[in-house]
Image (cartoon, helix red, strand yellow):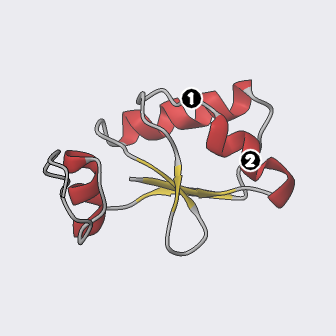
Amino acid sequence: MVELSVADADRARTMAAPTAAGADPRGGDSGAIVVPAPLGARSLHGVLRDLEAAGIAPERIGLRKPTLDEVFLTLTGRAAGTPVSSGKAA
């Protein structure tokens, strides 16, 4: 995962910006912005290029291993503990 922090004034633009990895940024537990990094360091370089193109300077940026919850969300598209809809009316 690429985890970054930006100035409050840039947060909304950063969250709305497309990423090189094709994944949408999302807010992390610590208030940081988190972007999946399937290509590791290459994903980090892509995110940096995207930020530079948008005129956004990160205050902090780095790679870290994803949590189990983040892996689950990436694979299923829903947070752990969220009920699965059966598609049937009750």
Classify residue 22 as left or right of residue 31. left
Camera sees residue 67:
no
Horizontally, is 52 left or right of 86 in the view? right
Quadrant position of the C terminus in the picture: bottom left
**Marked residue nearer the N-terminal end (1 or 2):** 2
Secondary structure of the residue carrying numbered label 2: helix
Type of residue at label 1?
Answer: Pro
SS at badge 1: loop
Residue hosting label 1: 18
| Residue 53 in picture, x, y percent from top left | 72, 24
Q: Are marks 1 and 2 in contact (CB under 8 Å)?
A: no
Residue nearer the viewer, 57 or 76: 76
**Left or right position of 81 against 43:** left
Looking at the image, is 22 positioned above or below residue 5? above
> On the image, numbered disc 2 is attached to which residue?
12
Question: From mark 1 to mark 2, how far is it between C-alphas?
Answer: 12 Å
Q: Residues within 10 Å of mark 2 (few under 14, many from 20)?
A: few
**Residue 54 can be seen in this image:** yes
Q: Residue at x 73, y 55 (%)?
A: 6
In the image, 57 versus 25, the foreground residue is 25
Name the residue type under label 2.
Ala
Farthest front residue?
90
In the image, residue 13 sits, relative to residue 6, either above or below, namely: above
Residue at 47%, 41% (x, y): give it.
44
Count residues near mark 1 (Cα–Cα under 10 Å), then give few for <14, some for 14-19, many for 20+: some
